[in-house]
Image (tube, grey):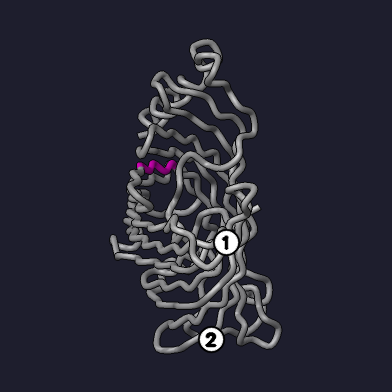
Amino acid sequence: MHKFALWLLLAMFFPILTGFDNAPPERKIVLFPEGPLFFVPLASPKEPRTHVTWLHLRLSGKSFNIGSVGFGDSFGLIRAPGFGVADSWQLGISGAVLAQFNMDSDSIDLINADYIIGLPLSYRNGPWSARARLFHQSSHLGDEFLLLPQSPELRQERINLSFEALELLAGWEWKGIRLTAGPSYIFHSDTSIKRNSVQAGLDYHRTKQVYTPSAHLFASLLWSAWEETDWNSDVSAKAGVHFRSPYTEKRAIQIFAEYFHGNLPFGQFYKLRSEYFGAGLNISF
């Protein structure tokens, strides 16, 4: 599997490395391009985004109010034309800190924080797109969570959850509808965990203007399963309004409601079967 991943990445990098000489003059290589070539499902709880969200978590018959925050983004480093008429490649870097707080505790305890950094390599040719991402994730329990007494439903034996993975996703778009799917493989971990996972997403991003020239409706649904959790189905959904700047596609605000049912996507709590719903605000810089 390691050799396969290496050859795959070399094959994807090749058009970028040769694009400087082969691209026609009208298709230039761009440093620090704006925006992505591949659009991931908006319902994905692990993608780098800057957001603040209130969640009502149901766990083992008890409910908790959770404050979920994320600080992160993806940054394009270089975009190059491919060998076709309209295809392009883009190499970037992405990173995020995703944290959850127990809003019902006296000191609003930090429960968990996930640190993620990756190198996404994306490709687009018309409605078709793909992304290969090498990424690292490490997860850490909060100090207050470890030191103070916790509800039995939230008690968790600490493990050193840290791993590196390769994620492959393919996408197709048609009239505001986006389909994505692909596998992931953990090729190194400090913890004894199983390696394979898979996901599939369906997004709708309405392009017809609503109320103001920059407001659009959107909805997103993501299904995923991980070998470590016996291939239990995890379902995440988001829907809301996307407010975009009239000057740039990247600068936007999303107001959304969300729902999740499955194994918690919060670091070391991945073994806990749960359900939550809530509302939040996402900001894209």
* Quarter location, residue 218: bottom left
- Residue 280 visible in the snapshot: yes
| 272 in relation to 31, above or below | below
- In the image, what residue occupies the spot 67% across and 81% down? 108
Give the overall secondary structure of the magenta segment.
strand
Upstream in sequence: badge 2 or badge 1: 2
| In this picture, residue 269 sits left or right of residue 70 | left
Q: Is residue 177 magenta?
A: no
Residue extending farthest to the top is: 21
Q: In the image, residue 281 lies at what x, y percent?
A: 59, 68
| Residue at the image position 62 percent from the left and 33 percent from the top | 77
Instruction: Examine the image and state in which quarter residue 244 appears.
Output: bottom right
Instruction: Residue 163 in the image: state x and y as whole percent.
Output: 50, 49
Q: Residue at x 64, y 70 (%)?
A: 142
Vertical side of 47 occupied by 218: above or below: below
Q: Residue lying farthest right?
A: 107
User: Which is in the foreground here, disc 2 or disc 1?
Assistant: 1
- Indicate the amino acid at tag 2: Ser
- Residue type (three-letter) at the residue carrying disc 1: Phe
- CA distance for labels 2 and 1: 39 Å
Q: Would you say the residues marked 2 and 1 are in contact, meaning their CB atoms lie under 8 Å apart? A: no
Numbered label attached to residue 243: 1
Q: Secondary structure at mark 2?
A: loop
User: Residue, x 49% and y 23% (percent of image)?
Assistant: 81
Q: Is residue 113 visible?
A: no
Circle 1 crowding by C-alpha within 10 Å: few under 14, some 14–19, many from 20 = many
Q: Secondary structure at mark 1?
A: strand
* Above or below, comparing residue 131 to residue 269 in the picture: above
- The numbered mark at residue 151 is 2
Region rendered in magenta: 166-170
